[in-house]
Amino acid sequence: MTTHTPGPWEARADYRGDLLDGVTLCFWEVVRPDPRDTGPDDPNRDMICDMGAHPDGEANARLIAAAPELLESLTLLVDAVTNGKNWPSYAAILDMRLYEARAAIAKATAAAAANT
């Protein structure tokens, strides 16, 4: 299996001013949070991707930032549905996996934006 940078990942707005005749642009990026990270030029920044000033930059960044949680929750949900029918606490485990999947979906969509 291919590996990726471990999560969690976070979507962040990076406001860069005076790029076009004094206009401040918002560039969306996805980073792996690091408490030592002080901003876009910090060497401790673990950049996953930079969305630039694309009109859909925020939505794209949120979707990409949620990728580790989406992968994990779907993997666990598939395992529970496929292998869990004989587990004593199948219903409770399935409910928990659905909750995790819904949380990952919320992070990837506007539902997360409304809660921040």
Image (cartoon, grey):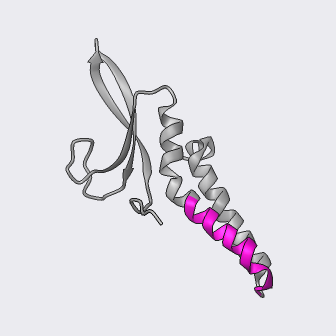
Q: How many marks?
A: 0
Q: What is the x, y in percent for residue 68?
A: 50, 58
Residue occupying image coordinates x 57% and y 47%: 108
Towards the viewer: 81 or 55: 81
Q: Is residue 100 left or right of residue 1?
A: right
* Residue at the top extreme of this rendering: 21
Residue occupying image coordinates x 49% and y 47%: 64
Towards the viewer: 73 or 109: 73
Q: Is residue 94 left or right of residue 38?
A: right
Q: Is residue 95 magenta?
A: no
Q: Write the start and end of the magenta stretch as one range.
A: 71-87
Q: Examine the image and state in which quarter residue 80 appears.
A: bottom right
* Residue at the bottom extreme of this rendering: 88
Q: What is the x, y in percent for residue 109?
A: 60, 44
Classify 26 as above or below 86: above
Q: Is residue 78 magenta?
A: yes
Q: What is the x, y in percent for residue 16?
A: 30, 28
Q: Is residue 87 left or right of residue 36?
A: right
Main secondary structure of the magenta stretch: helix
Q: What is the x, y in percent for residue 116?
A: 53, 46
Classify 40 as above or below 95: above
Residue occupying image coordinates x 36% and y 56%: 33
* Residue at the front extreme of this rendering: 1
Residue occupying image coordinates x 28% and y 11%: 21
Classify 83 as above or below 70: below
Q: Is residue 113 left or right of residue 11?
A: right
